[in-house]
Amino acid sequence: MKLAFKLALAGVVVLGAASFLYFGQGQTMPTEQPMTTLAGKQIKIADFKGKAVLVNFWATSCSGCMAEMPGLIKAQNDLGQAQLVTIAVAMSYDNPEYIQNYLKQVPLPFEVVHDQSGAIAKAFGEVQLTPTSFVLGKDGKLIKKIVGELSEAELVQLVRNAK
């Protein structure tokens, strides 16, 4: 049992390191990756040039994702659409019914996408762990990648310092 846990932990560390190396700070991100919101709107990060963008990979089954969501909502509301565009990307394995039920309980003030095929997660370096967030500058380049919960304070600071 201990060996299995150690191997699983080693796998997570390797995935995290590989993902970090895939996209480093200042690197251009997949801004042309097409996404379809749950409302049926076609978007891509390039549509929001001149604004900071948060791409947050999450799942309804992820306790860390649910814990960080109130802070992301507050940061988005406080900063407004003029400064920050948030795209919440639900993972491919997330149940569409669970996503809709969550949105009925907690209306999100940002774009919500269900990555049904996994293409978006793949474009962002094979994202597998949730929550994983990418904060992009006004130029579409990576400011910071966060694996784990992103705090409201950190997000606000990153956006206010974004170039």
Image (spheres, rainbow, N blue to C red):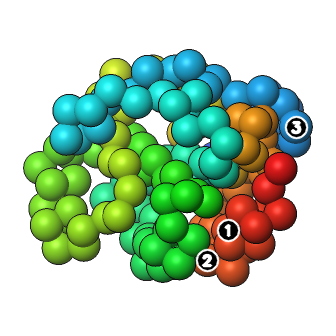
The answer to whether residue 159 is left or right of residue 56 is: right
Three-letter code, disc 1: Leu
Determine the image quadrant of residue 96. Answer: top left
Front-most of 123 and 79? 79
Labelled pair 1, 3 in contact (Cβ < 8 Å): no
Element type where label 3 sits in the image: loop
Residue at 66%, 51% (x, y): give it.
52
Q: CA distance from mark 2 to mark 1?
A: 5 Å
Residue behind mark 3:
26
Determine the image quadrant of residue 5. Answer: bottom right
Q: In x, y percent, where is residue 119?
A: 45, 21
Three-letter code, disc 2: Glu
Q: In x, y percent, where is residue 157?
A: 76, 72
| Category of crowding for the residue at label 3, using alpha-carbon neighbours closer than 10 angstroms: few (below 14), some (14–19), many (at least 20) | some
- Indicate which disc, 3 or 2, sits on the residue closer to the N terminus: 3
Vertical side of 6 occupied by 42: above or below: above
Residue behind mark 2:
152
Q: Say which quadrant the N terminus sits in.
A: bottom right
Element type where label 1 sits in the image: helix
Q: In x, y percent, where is residue 49?
A: 63, 36
- Indicate which disc, 1 or 3, sits on the residue closer to the N terminus: 3
Q: Which mark is residue 62?
A: none
Three-letter code, disc 3: Gly
Q: CA distance from mark 1 to mark 3?
A: 17 Å
Q: In x, y percent, where is residue 8?
A: 63, 47
Residue behind mark 1:
155
Labelled pair 2, 1 in contact (Cβ < 8 Å): yes
Vertical side of 150 occupied by 145: above or below: above
| Category of crowding for the residue at label 2, using alpha-carbon neighbours closer than 10 angstroms: few (below 14), some (14–19), many (at least 20) | some
Residue at 19%, 41% (x, y): give it.
39
Q: CA distance from mark 3 to mark 2?
A: 22 Å
Labelled pair 3, 2 in contact (Cβ < 8 Å): no
